[in-house]
Amino acid sequence: MTQEGFKRKLTAILSADVEGYSRLMNDDEEATIKTLTDYRVAMTTLIQKYRGRVVDTPGDNLLSEFASAVDAVKCAVEIQRELAARNVELPYERKMEFRIGINVGDVVAEGKRIYGDGVNIAARVESLAEAGGVCISGKAYDLVENKLEYEYEYLGEQKVKNISKPVRLYRVRGNSDDDPDTGTKLEPPDKPSIAVLPFNNMSGDPDQEFFSDGLTEQIITGISKIQSIFVIARNSTFTYKGKAVKVQQVAQELGVQYVLEGSVQKSGSRVRINAQLIDAATGHHLWAESYDRILEDIFAIQDDITIKLLEALPAKLIPGGLYHHYEGQVVSINAYITFLQGVEYFYRMTAGDNFNARKCFEKAISMDPNSSLAYAMLAYSHLNDIFQAWSKSPLESFEQAEKAALKAISLDESLDLPHIVLSQIYLFGRQHDKAIEYGEKAVALNLNNPLSHAMLALVFYFAGRSEEMLPLLDKAFRLNPVAPFYYYHFLGHTHFSLENYQEAIQAYKKSLDLNPDFIFPHLCLAMCYIATDHDDEAREAIANVLKIDPKYSLDRFKLASPHKDPSNTEKLLDLLRKSGLQ
């Protein structure tokens, strides 16, 4: 006993808290509290099953202790499986995912409470875990390594707040029996295929997330230019961000043979990166590398990862296939970091974030006037303003987008993104031949970019070449299996133009499932319903349009409908009139 009422003991501590709890509470306090209460009951039941006890539940945290590290780890894995199953029943924005950290250490007990470094380290380990994942300290790992049928990924020694010595950290991967059967399996293509998972941010600072995400995207960009390799798009691989999944599950769901994963720790002027390439069919590591360099070496590291990855794959590379794929892009480290911050804003897809993204791209250009990629993303941000109806002056936004895209191409003709932007600019400028020219050039420059395939399909729709849309959309969906809402909208156009109205309705509804406030699928549904004599459903669809934008009119639709054949636009306007749009 240390003093009256206090005693010391060695125990296994499990600390868990909710990822994004503040956002959930801000969105819906009552629903969040109810879900948290239900999940805590489930967690408590499992903790008791594995002979542990709940110590405290402050805020969104749950602290528990076990006499055995083995019991603690088994319980943590079981908790994540149980909560993952419950999350399936919740809408995406309401899913509640816990991070769990486990440590074995000496604690001071006062009644039912425990204190000390053992508890503090468990909390720090938990903060470094992924949402839906489990991390354990080196002390816990030493006790469970050979006692459980799990796999562990060593994440290095991590400096944690208020603890003098670095802590060894391991990620628990579970085993094949623990993986849920998602029911989604895609066959790999007949050439080397790969998915690059989001690199884990190990800095302990959520504000550095943009850096690890940016590194991941740059690697995807680099390898996607090799046409003898099939590369899954960012949009699909980032759905696994923060989740504890096995490479076999990823490979099955995305239809690839190889998976690249890694971690990034940026601290001051230094960066530590771990990367490993895994053959999902065998689970064997084909290549692994660790880098501990100054930040200015990031471009060389990205190149080295890409080249080593390509050398490890059985790909037939064209002469000169291994090249410096960042040449002509951002080369200043400060410009690069600013550019990555812009990309982080861009993918949030709100008006304010798009504005902030554009400011970052403009700042990156001021630091590095030869940054073709920054110009390309600047053009894309202007185009995004138009498509999302965020621009106060669409004409000015079109002009700015065209100017930035042309500048990007003048700096680097090999970039596909500015060609995509110009294709859309010329489409809505009713210059259909030029739109097709730039769209086809974008596809040719990067066969692994689903965006270029999807956008060329849209151009073909308005150009009256609907029969050419489906192969492009098939390729877009295959490269990006977790497809964004507008892919389904374009698919609806394909079926609508071919008068396959039921298939069109199904596609438009899927688009709305993913983005209920996207106005155009509502309009298209109205036209489908009128064309099939479902007048009540058509009027309901128009009512939904006017809920989103009470001032929406036939004139607005005409401006956003750049058909090459004016009679096609008139047919659509007639269907909308019959649906009740004024």
Image (cartoon, rainbow, N blue to C red):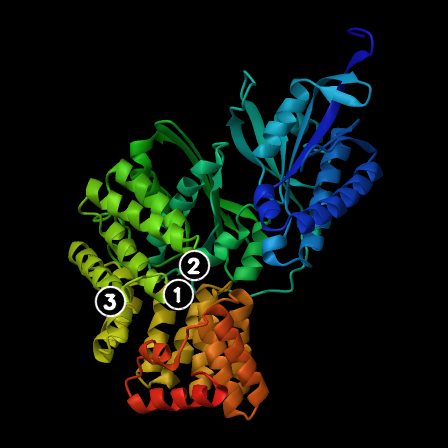
Residue 542 in picture, x, y percent from top left = 50, 79
* Residue that carries the numbered disc 3 in the rendered image: 395
Q: Nearer the viewer, mark 2 or mark 3?
A: 3
Q: Which residue is the site of mark 2?
A: 233
- Tell which of 364 and 580 is nearer to you: 580
- Label 3 or label 1, whichever lies nearer to me, is 3
- State how far apart marks 2 and 3 are (Cα): 31 Å
Whether residues under marks 2 and 1 lie with C-beta atoms below 8 angstroms apart, the answer is yes
Q: Quadrant of residue 471?
A: bottom left
Quarter location, residue 534: bottom right
Q: Secondary structure at mark 1?
A: helix
Work out whether 365 lies above or below 104: below
Q: Amino acid at mark 2?
A: Ala
Question: Is residue 572 found left or right of 21 in the rendered image?
Answer: left
**Nearer to the camera, 188 or 301:** 301
Can residue 330 be seen at all in this image of the molecule? no
Q: Residue tagged by mark 1?
A: 450
- Give the mark, 2 or 1, whose residue is nearer the N terminus: 2
> Badge 3: how crowded within 10 Å, few (<14), some, or many (20+)?
few
